[in-house]
């Protein structure tokens, strides 16, 4: 009898094949990351939080973020960091900064992505990860707007 439950490996391979089919590759991820963090650094509300944590040498952060997105989007397995403690350390970050982060990420995608499917693909993942980072950083109460 054929199993109707797809294995996790088969599901991952399918997602990876889909991502590649719609034009997501390392070259695109590099453009996405570089363009996004240019916007982040120029933004007066969120830029200073990054500059304070990262300082002048952005190259290691950009390289790490390319590995991160290649792992998230293409299952490349090149990122093995732990984002939560790094974000919990950002004492000036507030839940509303995530709105700015997500808006700039979407704007970057709309300007650079090879198709609208690529915008959706990244935004779905970014929203999910942002939600989980927010929960870890601030707990549920602040996210739903309660004190
Ligand atoms: C308010 C929104 C956010 C702020 C202010 C923020 C800020 C930062 C900063 C300053 C760093 C560098 C930390 C360091 O090197 O010490 C960092 C790293 C990182 N961020 Fe964010 N971030 C935000 C949202 C997000 C979101 C939504 C994602 C994913 C979708 C994300 C993924 C990452 C990852 C993967 C790292 C690398 C962590 C590591 O070193 O392994 N961030 N972030």
Image: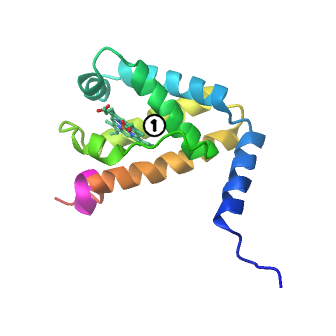
Q: Which residue range is magenta in the image? A: 137-142
Residue drawn at (37%, 21%) of the image: 41
Q: Where in the figure is residue 52, as x and y percent of width and height? A: 23, 24
In the image: residue 120, left or right of residue 52: right
* Figure quadrant of the N terminus: bottom right
Q: Where in the figure is residue 65, as x and y percent of width and height? A: 47, 32
| Crowd around label 1: few <14 · some 14–19 · many ≥20 (10 Å) | few
Say if 50 sits above or below 138 in the image.
above
Say if 136 sits above or below 97 in the image.
below
Residue drawn at (26%, 27%) of the image: 53
| Residue 51: quadrant of the picture | top left
Residue drawn at (40%, 26%) of the image: 61
Residue 139 lies in the magenta-colored region: yes
Q: Nearer the viewer, residue 13 or 15?
A: 13
* Figure quadrant of the C terminus: bottom left
Residue at the spot of label 1: 103
Give the SS element for disc 1. Answer: helix
Residue 82 lies in the magenta-colored region: no
Q: Nearer the viewer, residue 13 or 98?
A: 13
Say if 146 sits above or below 130 in the image.
below
């Amino acid at each position: 009898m054929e199993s109707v439950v797809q294995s996790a490996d088969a599901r991952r391979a399918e997602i990876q094949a889909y991502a590649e089919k719609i034009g997501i590759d390392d070259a695109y991820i590099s453009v996405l990351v570089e363009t996004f963090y240019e916007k982040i650094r120029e933004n007066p509300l969120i830029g200073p939080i990054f500059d304070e944590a990262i300082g002048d040498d952005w190259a290691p952060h950009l390289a790490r973020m390319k590995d991160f997105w290649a792992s998230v989007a293409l299952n490349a397995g090149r990122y093995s960091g732990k984002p939560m403690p790094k974000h919990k350390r950002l004492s000036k970050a507030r839940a509303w900064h995530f709105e700015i982060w997500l808006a700039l990420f979407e704007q970057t995608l709309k300007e650079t992505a090879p198709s609208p499917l690529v915008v959706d693909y990244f935004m779905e993942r970014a929203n999910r990860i942002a939600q989980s980072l927010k929960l870890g950083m601030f707990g549920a109460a602040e996210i739903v707007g309660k004190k």
